[in-house]
Image (spheres, rainbow, N blue to C red):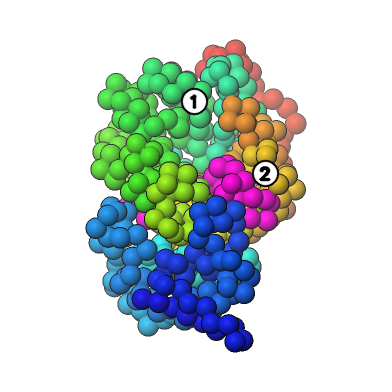
């Protein structure tokens, strides 16, 4: 059905919900490249005002990607929780924004409502929100997950220790792991992007990380970010797999370009759960969040699978895929795809806040790879801004990389020092189990998890010699 709004004597008409959503999106280069962006600021404003008047029920009746053509749409519609949606079913998109910003929408209310929101509802309301709105609401969302430690507790900021090396050198990886641990990083995961993406090499890296974790009794989990089918083979061969990684997208076609579908993700999750490698917690339950997903605005357009939608709406749909498999970690690699999709620091900052808000609203343990490529119109000051904003917004985890420069993937992200900065200025701590371990290992000062002990802990003396 068409949607319309007038500004002065100019009437703007949008032929369907997909078009309306695209025109209402804050400006970004990817939507311009796709030919779906508003042609003027006035058209964008008209679309945002028209979108604010759209009933939330419309998103259940008008799919932006056809139900018959896309398994992600079928997942969204078929698993929608009508009971959770019922208390908000009378609202418009604008009314939802007002409710989200109200005191009635506290953490408990947002948790109850999460399964009632579709990704398109979350994307729609984000398009009419300011940065401070996105931060305020995301901060109220509470999403906790567990494997060997607990991610997402209030007042906590975890990190993925990312010890990538361009040749998968054991010495280089060990040096980065030691460096990160000594700066208090690694409680979300110690996760390697392998340079050689084959089962034999992945198995070697998994065994290396597992040996370090077991030798030093680190309450964290490892992951080698290989294709999900490689990880399944590793599990079948007896490799010590903690988390299963996969990049995912918001349409069936995007996921097909990654070589996956919902069935193979389900197979991988079942395989990882069968290993029962998660810790037993004090409440008698084992940590069972075994999946790690990465997403990013622009991947659907890159795969020519965006169905005429804007990139942020498709990105939000990827969170429905993630939610299906109860992950430990999800993060948007926000500036990694490049300036063709997010042109500059301003667009990257906006996208990072949108992605974090939408995922948290949908009930996901959302982190962010706060990053940019070297040919984007952005710099580390932009990343400092986004890091600080996401820290205020309750981001679950960020990346920790030596010097913020990934020498294997060739992009700029956040460093171990950046995580310490965020924890210190915002009064945040690592995961509680990891915080206790840092004190026990004499890495941080007792009661001050952001204050480092100025000495190499004796237990780590031989790590650089590859002996665990």
Residue at the spot x=54%, y=14% of the render? 467
Q: Quadrant of residue 84?
A: bottom left
Q: Nearer the viewer, residue 300 or 270?
A: 300
Task: Name the residue: 69% across, 25% down.
Answer: 456
Q: Give the labeled residue for mark 1.
A: 194
The segment highlighted magenta reads 318-347
Residue 235: give x, y in percent of width and height: 31, 27
Badge nearest the viewer, 1 or 2: 2
Q: Nearer the viewer, residue 252 or 108?
A: 252
Q: What SS does tag 2 mark?
A: loop
Say left or right for 221 vs 45.
left
Residue tagged by mark 2?
A: 376
- Classify 142 as above or below 222: below
Place of residue 38 in the rendered image (x, y in percent of width and height, measured from the top left): 56, 66
- Image vertical order of residue 431 relative to residue 63, above or below: above
> Residue visible at 55% across and 52% down?
33
Q: Is residue 328 magenta?
A: yes
């Amino acid at each position: 059905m068409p949607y319309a709004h007038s500004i002065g004597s100019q009437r703007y008409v949008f032929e369907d919900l997909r078009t309306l959503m695209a025109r209402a999106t804050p400006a970004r280069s990817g939507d311009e490249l796709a030919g779906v962006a508003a042609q003027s600021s006035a058209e964008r404003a008209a679309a945002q005002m028209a979108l604010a008047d759209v009933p939330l029920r419309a998103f259940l009746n008008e799919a932006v990607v056809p139900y018959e053509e896309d398994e992600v749409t079928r997942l969204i519609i078929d698993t929608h929780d009508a009971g959770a949606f019922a208390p908000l079913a009378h609202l418009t998109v604008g009314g939802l924004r007002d409710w989200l910003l109200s005191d009635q929408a506290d953490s408990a209310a947002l948790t109850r409502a999460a399964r009632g929101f579709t990704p398109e509802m979350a994307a729609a309301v984000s398009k009419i929100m300011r940065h401070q709105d996105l931060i305020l609401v995301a901060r109220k969302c509470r999403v906790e997950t567990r494997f060997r430690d607990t991610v997402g507790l209030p007042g906590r900021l975890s990190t993925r220790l990312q010890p990538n090396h361009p040749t998968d050198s054991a010495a280089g990886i060990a040096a980065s792991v030691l460096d990160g641990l000594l700066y208090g990083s690694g409680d979300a995961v110690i996760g390697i992007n392998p340079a050689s993406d084959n089962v034999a090499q992945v198995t070697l890296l998994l065994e290396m990380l597992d040996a370090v974790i077991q030798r030093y009794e680190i309450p964290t989990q490892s992951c080698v970010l290989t294709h999900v089918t490689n990880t399944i083979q590793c599990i079948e061969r007896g490799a010590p797999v903690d988390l299963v990684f996969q990049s995912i997208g918001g349409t069936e076609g995007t996921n097909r370009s990654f070589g996956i579908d919902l069935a193979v993700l389900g197979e991988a999750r079942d395989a990882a759960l069968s290993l029962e490698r998660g810790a037993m917690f004090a409440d008698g339950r084992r940590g069972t969040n075994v999946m790690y997903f990465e997403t990013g605005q622009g991947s659907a357009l890159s795969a020519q699978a965006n169905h005429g939608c804007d990139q942020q709406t498709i990105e939000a749909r990827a969170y429905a895929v993630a939610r299906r498999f109860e992950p430990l970690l999800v993060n948007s690699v926000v500036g990694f795809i490049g300036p063709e999709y997010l042109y500059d620091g301003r667009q990257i900052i906006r996208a990072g806040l949108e992605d974090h808000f939408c995922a948290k609203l949908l009930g996901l343990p959302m982190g962010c790879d706060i990053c940019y490529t070297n040919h984007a119109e952005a710099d580390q000051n932009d990343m400092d801004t986004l890091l600080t904003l996401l820290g205020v917004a309750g981001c679950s985890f960020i990346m920790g990389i030596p010097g913020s420069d990934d020498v294997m993937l060739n992009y700029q992200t956040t460093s171990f020092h950046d995580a310490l900065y965020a924890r210190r200025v915002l009064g945040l701590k690592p995961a509680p189990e990891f915080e206790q371990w840092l004190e026990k290992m004499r890495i941080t000062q007792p009661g001050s998890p952001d204050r480092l002990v100025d000495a190499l802990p004796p237990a780590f003396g031989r790590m650089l010699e590859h002996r665990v």
